Image (cartoon, grey):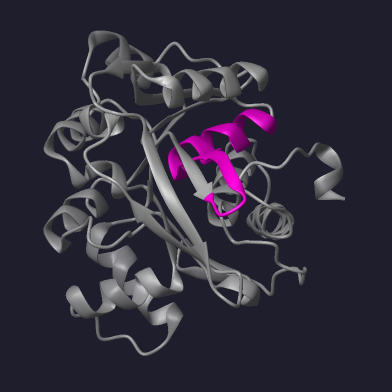
């Protein structure tokens, strides 16, 4: 039986110098889960405007369900993306936008209740409206998966502490881990020590740490797994971490061993980094 995952958060247009591409970390995760065969539901909001209409058309082209995407009177989100010399992405995220005002409903609650997992991130919680919706839905989730996803200046350590306290699975990158080390006053000197301290502090069952071209780590039941990653020619890093997380979740829910889960996640993350934009087309061949 297909596993069901609900994600909540950003839907937007990434605006590159050469044009715009559909994106948003939460939508990216949802699309990759969908590509990998999971029954995926995505909670977000668009504006009643041309950008919103085009995003719905994009999702329809990808045979992705749109029934949980709300329409409100705020504009559809756009983000200016700038790539540095190493093809690392920097983002200018406008506010307020439609996904800042996601409304709680009985339909959302019933959807999360029956799902196998619920994926949320910190950026969605920059505004009280959507933050309260996320926190309400977390009460009903069976498996809670937190993508830290720090974007300056849209986070506070107080909100991060609250979101960390709800998580069963955490995904964090190396820069986010350093921020948490500083603001949570963690004493560890190695990645392993820091992950174990985070796990103990917030009772988090699994923590994924991505370290760019150096691969990724997973702490599970106090055991540290490491994958050195796959070397590719990077086109841009937009969505690579999102595809890693989606593949990790998909593989975990489908019962793969942890070593295999990590390998699969690194493969897809590297493939996405080798392509332009967050949502390139791929099939099962990406795992070979």
User: In the rendered structure, which segment of residues is drawn in magenta?
Assistant: 16-36
Judged from this view, the residue extending furthest toward the bottom is: 189
Q: Quadrant of residue 24?
A: top left
Is 68 left or right of 202, judged from the image as shown? Answer: right
The residue that appears at 48% across and 56% down in the rendered structure is: 81
Q: Quadrant of residue 161?
A: bottom left
Residue 7: x and y in percent read 42, 32
Q: Can residue 234 be found in the magenta stretch?
A: no
Residue 277: x and y in percent read 63, 49
Q: Quadrant of residue 104?
A: top left
Q: How many marks?
A: 0
Please tell me which residue lies in front, 256 or 180: 180
Please tell me which residue lies in front, 51 or 248: 51
Is 237 left or right of 285, judged from the image as shown? Answer: left
Residue 203: x and y in percent read 28, 57
Judged from this view, the residue extending furthest toward the front is: 18
Which quarter of the figure is the N terminus placed in?
Answer: top right
Look at the image and tell me whether residue 195 can be seen: no
């Amino acid at each position: 039986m297909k596993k069901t995952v609900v994600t909540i958060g950003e839907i937007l247009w990434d605006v590159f110098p050469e044009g715009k591409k559909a994106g948003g970390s939460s939508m990216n995760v949802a699309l990759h889960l969908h590509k990998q065969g999971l029954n995926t539901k995505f909670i977000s909001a668009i504006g009643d405007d041309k950008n919103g209409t085009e995003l719905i058309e994009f999702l329809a082209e990808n045979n992705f369900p749109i029934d949980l995407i709300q329409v409100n009177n705020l504009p559809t989100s756009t983000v200016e993306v700038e790539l540095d010399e190493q093809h690392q992405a920097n983002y200018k995220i406008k506010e307020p936008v439609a996904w800042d005002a996601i409304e709680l409903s009985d339909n959302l609650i019933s959807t999360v209740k029956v799902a196998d997992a619920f994926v949320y991130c910190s950026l969605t919680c920059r505004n009280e409206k959507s933050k309260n919706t996320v926190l309400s839905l977390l009460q009903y989730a069976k498996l809670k998966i937190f993508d830290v996803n720090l974007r300056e200046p849209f986070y506070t350590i107080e909100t991060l502490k609250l979101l960390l306290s709800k998580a069963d699975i955490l995904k964090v990158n190396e820069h986010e881990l350093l921020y948490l080390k500083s603001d949570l006053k963690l004493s560890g000197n190695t990645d392993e020590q820091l992950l174990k301290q985070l796990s103990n502090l917030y009772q988090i069952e699994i923590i994924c740490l991505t370290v760019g071209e150096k691969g990724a780590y997973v702490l599970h039941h106090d055991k540290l797994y490491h994958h050195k990653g796959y070397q590719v020619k990077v086109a841009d890093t937009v969505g690579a971490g999102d595809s890693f997380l989606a593949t990790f979740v998909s593989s975990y829910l489908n019962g793969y061993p942890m070593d295999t889960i990590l390998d699969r996640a690194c493969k897809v993350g590297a493939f996405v980094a080798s392509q332009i934009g967050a949502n390139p087309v791929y099939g099962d061949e990406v795992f070979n």
